[in-house]
């Protein structure tokens, strides 16, 4: 039987131990600051980039790996496996999917041994898909079956975040200055979600941030239809241990999951959503 | 309160005021439309709103303009509203509302202006347009009540804001004072640290001088060593405080210069090994050899951060390992240097990680009560890395271990890798290690070097590998020595082991000391001298001393200086140290130095530059002075580069005794080299002393000798001189008796040796003599046959030590002097041809029977003679030296040359 390798982008935000244990290799994104260009997760962490920006750092631009880097990465992977399934961040959020696809064109016949899937999600939204793929691989399922399941699953994943303010969204050009000012003035906390691969404003929470986070969790877990209780990711950027404990307690109040995994957002995700961002990411039941 | 907080508050206030103003304006617009007021009101409201919006949101508008304009517009809008309605009273509520709105700015003057305007408005209504009716008493009372309520509310607002303003001023003042106090504290710390550092340096330096002295009482030595160690710890803390205050006051300046990471690594490893001490932890180093050798950055600070992280890791790890990883990623501007220090220590909880980089904090103080430190190290490291444009982070699992990693962007001056293999395609190296970690490092290194390097799991695989180089850990080597001895006939075999308790593998097998990483491995693959031949090591016990030689060691790193000085101490040379190129030049101008060891990479003025300056000096002495480069540069062609730069030779770091021995022998004036001896009292390795711990009798203990001879040092010296004088004769006599198997007289002689040796403090020799005496008496001659050689060797060593001791402790000791140093040719006695023949014949016999000891004796005995004006030392001395190196053919050739001179050929 062919050996299949699962790979993904570093912005999947899955814990390093899990990736290492399951042999899931990642392609690194880059963060360019005023002083240099750093590999996300390897050279620079979420904490680093947030602290840099909070202390007046001028810029922290994120960039996807170039097609050639994808090519090198895939060729390296093909030394270990006969076939590769690469699960990529949403095409509408980053250029990485296109770059990975482009890389296949430079790989000749080897390109046919790599499948690149657009997850239409980011962060642990991709993580859910990767874990599903790894589990299916463990069950001895074929690459076709995994790909088909991934396609079906993307519609059922709920990826949403509540951000403390709109500062970082403004910095990265996702909202206008006026929207940022209004959010600042009236203590508004945008809730963003991934819809058909695009980041859209789902909701706005008002007032004290900690309370807004609790209300966001309640809303997500009670108004999202039937939730698959197998696994929940709580993914955050620069939140205190106290807030995360409160978030865990709050999730327990509304839905009991078999597994709750707390992960830190990658530097790329953090530099786009900012300090204090929290997301609860889960999979909905079919139908 | 930070300045940014104040700015943010002001921004928020102006935006809140704008929002309320716009809301009011919209309500007025609606009123204008519904009540059919004149159209200019609508235009006025639109204009007001537009102006206020611009002033609020367009950046760079004058800060105070928006509140004033908004206040005026607020007033005029309200006034217009009341005029249009021809009624003052509905406006009263609006006036109060506007006053509250204006009070958002917390500006008393602004509110005062507004109250004045409102007063003017009221007067306008009452006296000008007369909208207020005072016809009846209730109307008058209503007016008074309304006005009183309105102005009282405004007055209270004014008082409230005034008190707020005062509080804010007090707060600002407190912040200023706190900042000033912080500055004073930093200045004080900096000054105080500097003031403490100067006398501390003196204390540490003086201790070093005391420790260098010979004949020190053990307890004095130990106390002095403890003072020095404590002094160094205190100095390190003071340096931390100095650095921290510099960073805090923004005075820390980075000096970006070209540096070689190999040199940094060597320093870090030296330091880490010293810190590790007797802890049972393994230090792994995984350094990418492809990192360019010429990087631009502040090497001193980079080294400081790595050492700090390594020190922490070693400090908090009781068993397991500490792994230092150094790698790079290529970038357009040069490279990102990535460093990771991972330990298997106690770990840090998630809560504590948040506090980790805070100044003056040591996390988990209860658990770490035994661990010293100021808690400044990580805060300093973080600030330094941030200043270099990099990032530092930590990940940890409580009870499992911690990993600190940092990355810094660096420019590249020289792209050449810091270590490379000469002939990679013809090398096939195999590793045979116990742990997975070494196997992983080994295979990874092979990939980076482009060399076929892999690990074997079984001896069968090893045999089948047919490699050019074998690297085997000590444990695997000991399992099957024969296998590796056989392999060493066809390939190079290296045993990788710790320095402490190193074993001596069999013939042709070389030894590599841990940490086992790219630099020594590359040197081994290139066949360079960083590797020790175990046969050399066996004889690496110091084979000569040079008390007259003045040697200067130059290195910016005090630990390196200490290591180098420690290695050279057994040679009993006069060692001097300098911590910079500049200091070295100054020292060379004022002192007569015979040999210089110069570190290659130093801040400010590096070794190459310093050497060029020395060579350019006018006097001939500076042009001929031997200068040896100390370098961690394992790149091909390093030797050529150093020779071209004016160095005479180079020694690779870490310095190995065999290489040092070679260099000293080559470059020190020959007449300075003296007979071999072990040096138990002077230049004694401190570690050996500590390890000894009183378990084994010392070779020579003058203190004991003095007490045995009545406590008078002069009497002791007289007895010692006699012992030394008669020593050679006695030794030869014992040897003679042994050869003749005259056991009866042999026992008498060793009995005498037992007591005389004990009386001078040669306890070990006395004990051996006692053992042989007992063996003789018990007729166990096999024991005598086995141990006689050892006795004779030890006897000869003691005589040498006694001579040295006398030389250093008596003002005049012509006997010792004549034996130790070669007098001028004019002072030598002419030897008769027959006597010379006899010596030559004895020396030839000694050569034939590979007897180095007799060769050395002959060299000593003939040192006072000359033949036809030619000093005999020249020939016999050289022959003895060659014999000592087991080069008996060359020694015989030297004797042949002397015969030719004698025959006049």
Image (tube, coloured by chain):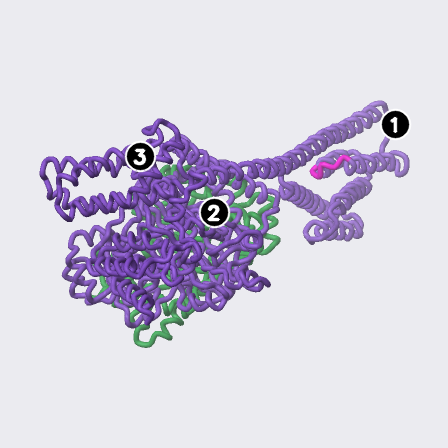
Chain colours: A green, B purple
Residue bearing the label numbered 2 = B558
Determine the CA span between mark 3 and mark 2: 36 Å
Q: Which mark is residue B761?
A: 3
* Chain at tag 1: B
Callout 1 environment at 10 Å: few (<14), some (14 to 19), or many (20+)? Answer: few
Where residue B554 appears, as percent x and y from the top left, is 49, 53
Dot 3 falls on a residue whose secondary structure is loop
Above or below, A139 relative to B134: below
Q: Nearer the viewer, residue B845 or B524?
A: B845
- Give whichever of discs 3 and 1 has the lower sequence position: 1
Q: Image check: B71 left or right of B398?
A: right
Where residue B111 appears, as percent x and y from the top left, is 77, 36
Where residue A213 appears, as percent x and y from the top left, is 47, 42
* Chain at tag 2: B
The quarter in which the C terminus of chain A is drawn is bottom left
Residue segment shown in magenta = B104-108
Q: Nearer the viewer, residue B426 or A280?
A: B426
- Give whichever of discs 3 and 2 has the lower sequence position: 2
Q: Residue furthest left?
A: B779
């Amino acid at each position: 039987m062919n050996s299949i390798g699962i790979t993904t982008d570093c912005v999947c935000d899955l814990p390093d131990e899990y990736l290492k244990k399951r042999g899931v290799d990642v392609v690194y994104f880059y963060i360019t600051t005023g002083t240099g260009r750093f590999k996300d997760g390897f050279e620079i962490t979420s904490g680093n980039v947030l602290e840099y920006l909070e202390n007046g750092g001028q810029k922290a631009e994120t960039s996807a790996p170039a097609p050639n880097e994808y090519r090198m990465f895939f060729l390296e992977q093909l030394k270990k496996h006969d076939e590769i399934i690469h699960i990529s961040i949403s095409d509408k959020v980053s250029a990485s999917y296109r770059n990975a696809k482009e890389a296949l064109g430079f790989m000749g016949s080897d390109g046919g041994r790599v499948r690149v899937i657009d997850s239409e999600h980011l962060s642990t939204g991709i993580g859910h898909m990767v874990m599903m793929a790894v589990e299916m691989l463990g069950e001895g399922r074929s690459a076709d079956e995994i790909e088909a399941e991934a396609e079906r699953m993307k519609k059922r994943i709920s990826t949403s975040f509540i951000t403390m303010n709109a500062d970082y969204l403004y910095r990265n050009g996702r909202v206008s200055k006026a929207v940022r000012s209004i959010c600042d003035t009236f203590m508004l906390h945008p809730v963003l979600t991934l819809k058909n691969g695009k980041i859209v404003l789902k909701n706005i929470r008002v007032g004290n941030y900690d309370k807004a986070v609790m209300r966001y969790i309640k809303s997500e877990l009670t108004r999202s239809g039937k939730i698959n209780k197998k696994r929940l990711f709580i993914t955050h950027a620069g939140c205190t241990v106290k807030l995360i404990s409160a978030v865990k307690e709050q999730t327990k109040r509304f839905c009991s999951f078999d597994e709750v995994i707390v992960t830190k957002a990658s530097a790329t995700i953090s530099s786009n959503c900012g300090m204090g961002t929290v997301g609860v990411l889960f999979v909905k039941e079919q139908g | 309160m930070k300045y940014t907080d104040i700015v943010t508050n002001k921004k928020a206030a102006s935006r809140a005021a704008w929002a309320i103003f716009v809301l009011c304006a919209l309500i007025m617009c609606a009123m204008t439309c519904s009540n059919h007021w004149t159209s200019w009101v609508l235009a006025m409201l639109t204009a007001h709103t537009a102006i206020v919006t611009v002033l609020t949101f367009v950046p760079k508008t004058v800060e105070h303009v928006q509140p004033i304009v908004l206040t005026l517009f607020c007033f005029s809008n309200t006034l217009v509203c009341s005029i249009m309605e021809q009624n003052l009273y509905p406006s009263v509520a609006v006036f109060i509302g506007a006053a509250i709105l204006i009070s958002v700015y917390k500006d008393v003057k602004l509110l005062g202006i507004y109250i004045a305007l409102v007063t003017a408005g009221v007067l306008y209504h009452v006296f000008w347009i007369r909208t207020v009716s005072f016809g009846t008493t209730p109307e008058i009372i209503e007016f008074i009540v309304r006005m009183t309520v309105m102005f009282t509310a405004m007055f209270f607002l004014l008082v409230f804001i005034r008190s707020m303003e005062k509080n804010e001023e007090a707060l600002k003042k407190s912040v200023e004072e706190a900042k000033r106090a912080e500055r004073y504290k930093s200045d004080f710390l900096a000054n105080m640290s500097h003031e403490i550092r100067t006398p501390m340096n003196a204390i540490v330096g003086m201790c070093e001088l005391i420790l260098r002295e010979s004949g020190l009482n053990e307890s004095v030595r130990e106390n002095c060593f403890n003072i020095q160690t404590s002094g160094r710890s205190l100095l390190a803390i003071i340096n931390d405080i100095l650095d921290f205050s510099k960073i805090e006051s923004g005075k820390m300046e980075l000096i970006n210069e070209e540096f070689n990471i190999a040199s940094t690594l060597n320093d870090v490893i030296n330091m880490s090994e010293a810190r590790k001490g007797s802890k049972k932890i393994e230090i792994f180093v995984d350094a990418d050899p492809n990192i360019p050798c010429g990087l631009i950055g502040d090497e001193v600070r980079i080294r400081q951060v790595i050492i700090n992280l390594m020190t922490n890791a070693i400090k908090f790890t009781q068993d397991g390992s500490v792994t230092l990883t150094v790698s790079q990623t290529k970038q357009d501007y040069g490279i990102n240097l990535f460093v990771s220090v991972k330990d298997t220590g106690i770990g840090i909880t998630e809560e504590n990680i948040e506090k980790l980089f805070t100044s003056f904090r040591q996390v988990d103080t209860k658990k770490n009560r035994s661990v010293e430190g100021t808690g400044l190290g990580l805060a300093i490291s973080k600030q330094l890395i941030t200043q270099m444009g990099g990032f530092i982070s930590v990940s940890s699992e409580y009870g499992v271990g911690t990993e600190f990693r940092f990355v810094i962007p660096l420019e590249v001056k020289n792209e050449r890798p810091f270590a490379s293999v000469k002939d990679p395609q013809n090398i096939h190296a195999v590793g045979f290690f116990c742990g997975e970690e070494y196997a992983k490092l080994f295979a990874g290194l092979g990939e980076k070097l482009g060399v076929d390097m892999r690990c074997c799991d079984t001896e069968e695989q090893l045999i089948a590998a047919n490699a050019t180089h074998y690297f085997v850990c000590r444990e695997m080597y000991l399992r099957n020595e024969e296998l590796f001895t056989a392999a060493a006939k066809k390939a190079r075999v290296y045993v990788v082991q710790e320095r402490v308790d190193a074993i001596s593998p069999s013939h042709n097998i070389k030894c590599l000391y841990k940490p086992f990483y790219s630099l020594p491995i590359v040197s081994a693959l290139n066949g360079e001298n960083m590797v020790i031949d175990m046969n050399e090591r066996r004889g690496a016990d110091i084979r000569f001393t040079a008390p007259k030689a003045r040697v200067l060691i130059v290195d910016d790193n005090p630990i390196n200086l200490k290591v180098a000085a420690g290695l050279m101490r057994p040679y009993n040379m006069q060692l001097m140290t300098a911590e910079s190129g500049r200091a070295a030049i100054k020292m060379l101008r004022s002192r007569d130095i015979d040999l210089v060891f110069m570190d290659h990479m130093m801040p400010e003025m590096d070794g190459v530059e310093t050497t060029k300056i020395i060579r350019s000096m006018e006097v001939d002495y500076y042009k001929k002075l031997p200068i040896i480069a100390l370098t961690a540069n394992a790149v091909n062609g390093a030797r050529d580069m150093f020779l071209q730069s004016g160095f005479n030779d180079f020694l690779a770091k870490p310095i190995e005794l065999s290489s040092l021995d070679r260099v000293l022998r080559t470059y020190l004036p020959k007449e300075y080299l003296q007979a071999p001896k072990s040096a138990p009292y002077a230049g004694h390795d401190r570690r050996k002393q500590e390890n000894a711990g009183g378990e084994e009798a010392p070779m020579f203990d003058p203190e004991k000798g003095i007490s045995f001879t009545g406590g008078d040092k002069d009497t002791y010296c007289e007895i010692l001189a006699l012992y030394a004088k008669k020593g050679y004769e006695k030794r030869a006599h014992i040897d003679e008796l042994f050869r003749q198997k005259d056991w009866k007289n042999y026992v008498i002689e060793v009995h005498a040796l037992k007591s005389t040796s004990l009386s001078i403090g040669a306890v070990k020799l006395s004990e051996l003599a006692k053992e042989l005496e007992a063996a003789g008496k018990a007729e166990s001659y096999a024991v005598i046959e086995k141990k006689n050689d050892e006795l004779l060797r030890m006897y000869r060593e003691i005589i040498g030590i006694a001579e040295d001791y006398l030389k250093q402790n008596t003002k005049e000791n012509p006997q010792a002097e004549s034996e130790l140093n070669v007098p001028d040719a004019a002072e030598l006695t002419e030897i008769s041809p027959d006597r010379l023949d006899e010596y030559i014949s004895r020396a030839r016999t000694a050569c034939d029977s590979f007897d180095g000891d007799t060769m050395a004796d002959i060299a000593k005995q003939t040192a006072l003679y000359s033949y036809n004006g030619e000093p005999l030392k020249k020939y016999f001395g050289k022959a003895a030296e060659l014999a000592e190196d087991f080069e008996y053919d060359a020694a015989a050739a030297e004797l042949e040359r002397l015969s030719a001179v004698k025959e006049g050929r």
